[in-house]
Amino acid sequence: MVQPLLREVYGRLLRRMRQQQGRTLAEVAAEAGISMAYLSEIERGLKEPSSEILAAVCGALDATIVGLVGAAHVELRDLTDAVSREARVLDLASRRGVHARAVDGAGAASTSAAPARGGVVLAA
């Protein structure tokens, strides 16, 4: 699985906020005190902005770093949930008659009776 980069997620979120407000790159960049070209690179996920730059852009968009990080968390979780549901790790107990425990990528566990021998772990 290719993991999404945080800078790409932040960029998408910042661009979406700016566009929802009907504002131009030039307006937001000027208010944040950065160049229009740099803001464009941030929005396209090409630059890894410092926390100070993120705070300035968020301030220009009447948003907060906490809101941006929270939205990024939700987006990252949503992006990885589909893949995580498909990947399962099966931990077979080392003693006979002990329940096998399947753990999916999201950390949810399910158990079933299975006569397992040896500490076998299967990944699917």
Image: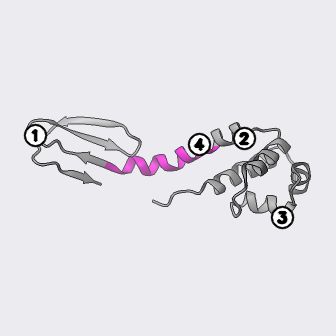
Residue 88: x and y in percent read: 32, 48
Position in image of residue 38 (x %, y %): 81, 62
Alpha carbon separation for disc pair 3 and 2: 21 Å
Which secondary structure type mostly characterizes the magenta part of the structure?
A: helix
Q: Which secondary structure, mark 3?
A: helix
Instruction: Decide: few, some or many residues near mark 4? Use Cα within 10 Å; few <14, some 14-19, many ≥20.
Output: some
Q: Which badge, 4 or 3, is on the more N-terminal residue? A: 3
Q: Which residue is mark 1?
A: 95
Q: Position of residue 75 (x, y in %)?
A: 59, 45
Residue 116 located within the stretch drawn in magenta: no
Residue on which the image places disc 3: 37
User: Is tag 1's residue or tag 3's residue first in the polypeptide sequence?
Assistant: 3
Residue 124: mark: none
Three-letter amino acid code at the position of disc 3: Ala
Amino acid type at circle 2 is Ile
Q: CA distance from mark 4 to mark 1?
A: 39 Å
Do the residues bearing badges 2 and 1 touch, measured as CB atoms within 8 Å?
no
Marked residue nearer the N-terminal end (2 or 4)? 2
**Number of marks drawn:** 4
Give the magenta part as a residue range: 72-88
Circle 2 sits in a helix, a strand or a loop, which is it?
A: helix
Mark 4 or 1 closer to N-term? 4
Mark 3 or 2, which is nearer the eye? 2
Q: Which residue is mark 2?
A: 65
